[in-house]
Every structure is written in C-alpha cells, then in structure tokens.
Amino acid sequence: MATMQIVGVPMVQHVIDKQLITDAFERLGYDRVLRAHVALAHGNGGDWHNCFLAMAYGGYGKLYECLPPVSPDVSYDVAQILDLTVREVWAVTEAFDHCLTEFQILVEEWLELNKNPALVLRDLAIRAYGRENVDLESFAKAAAYCDQPEIKMQLAGVR
C-alpha cells in the first residue's frame, strides 16, 4: 500500500489500543463481537450505519436509528447504548476506520480464544435449518454430529 504525504504536513500514524479494544469485546460479549465480525467483510469505515459497533448492536442502520437526531457527541451516545466507555468506542472506531487488517486479526484472535462451543453449535444448527429460533430438537440433531464432549456437556445446560 502506498502512502502519500503532503509536504509540510506531518503524517498521522494510527496505532490500535489492543487493551481498550479487548475490554470493549469483553463488555460486548461473544455474540455481539461475532455478529460485528460481518462488518469486517464490508470494511466501510466512517459510516455509523455499518461500522463494527453498529453491526454489534444489531444490523445495518439499527444503531443509527437509536442515536438522537442532534447530538454534540455521538461517541458518548454510542457508548451509552452499548454499555461501553467513550474511550472504548474511540479505540474500536479508530482501529476499524484506520487499521482494519490489524483490527480484523485482533477480532479473529479474540473470537477464537473466547469461543463458546454451545454458540458454535447453535450457529451450525441455524445454518442447517435456516432459522434463528432453533429448537432443542435441532440442537440434538446437530449434537449427534458432534464428537466433542465439552459441547455435549454445554448442550445439557441449554435446556
């Protein structure tokens, strides 16, 4: 990637704050971070409709609909809606907007480290049966294909 600098204007170096971003992921939770991971495929930084935090909240435009029509500080409003600190919102937004590749790697690493086997199985059942409200029978069918004891143990607690 080529970098262009205007003579006399210092270049801005963006560095992601991994600790703040990880803290934000913890507060958002696995489901929201996984849902927001979809936003990384689009990579449209600078758009509150489909940025990482908007996708974590719901879907395209859902977060934006919750924001006040006139706000002196959108970051504060987003922090309030998602139960994050303003610093966490800034860290995630900056990383998503300016360091997308590094941010994507951090998201994938966090998801892998925090993978909940029951959620993974639920996602497989949703894909297999094509609906959000997967019943216990669908879980049972999906579990039949699973040979991992920790997932079967977690499924016992899903009931």
Image (tube, grey):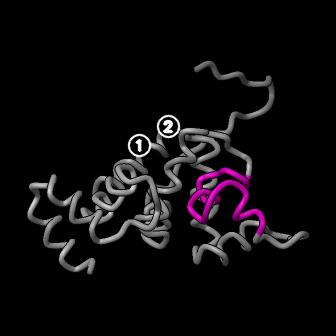
The answer to whether 134 appears left or right of 93 in the picture is left
How far apart marks 2 and 1 lie (CA) works out to 6 Å
Residue 131, image x and y in percent?
A: 46, 58
Residue 103, image x and y in percent?
A: 49, 46
Q: Check the image and report above or below for 151 versus 83.
A: above
| Within-10-Å neighbours for mark 2: few <14, some 14–19, many 20+ | few
Which quadrant: the N terminus? top right
Q: Check the image and report above or below for 32 versus 68.
A: above
Q: Residue furthest top?
A: 2
Viewer-closest of 152 and 95: 152
- Residue found 70% across the figure and 63% down from its top: 62
Q: How many marks?
A: 2
**Helix, strand or loop at mark 2:** helix
- Residue found 46% across the figure and 62% down from its top: 132
Specify the segment rendered in magenta: 48-65
- Looking at the rendered structure, the kind of residue marked 1 is Ile
**Helix, strand or loop at mark 1:** helix
Q: What label sits on residue 101 in the rendered view?
A: 2
Q: Are marks 2 and 1 in contact (CB under 8 Å)?
A: yes
Which quadrant: the C terminus? bottom left
Does the magenta segment cover residue 60?
yes
Q: Quadrant location of residue 116?
A: bottom left
Residue 140, image x and y in percent?
A: 21, 65
| Within-10-Å neighbours for mark 1: few <14, some 14–19, many 20+ | few
Does the magenta segment cover residue 148?
no
Q: What label sits on residue 86 in the rendered view?
A: none
Residue 119, image x and y in percent?
A: 32, 63
Residue carrying label 1: 105
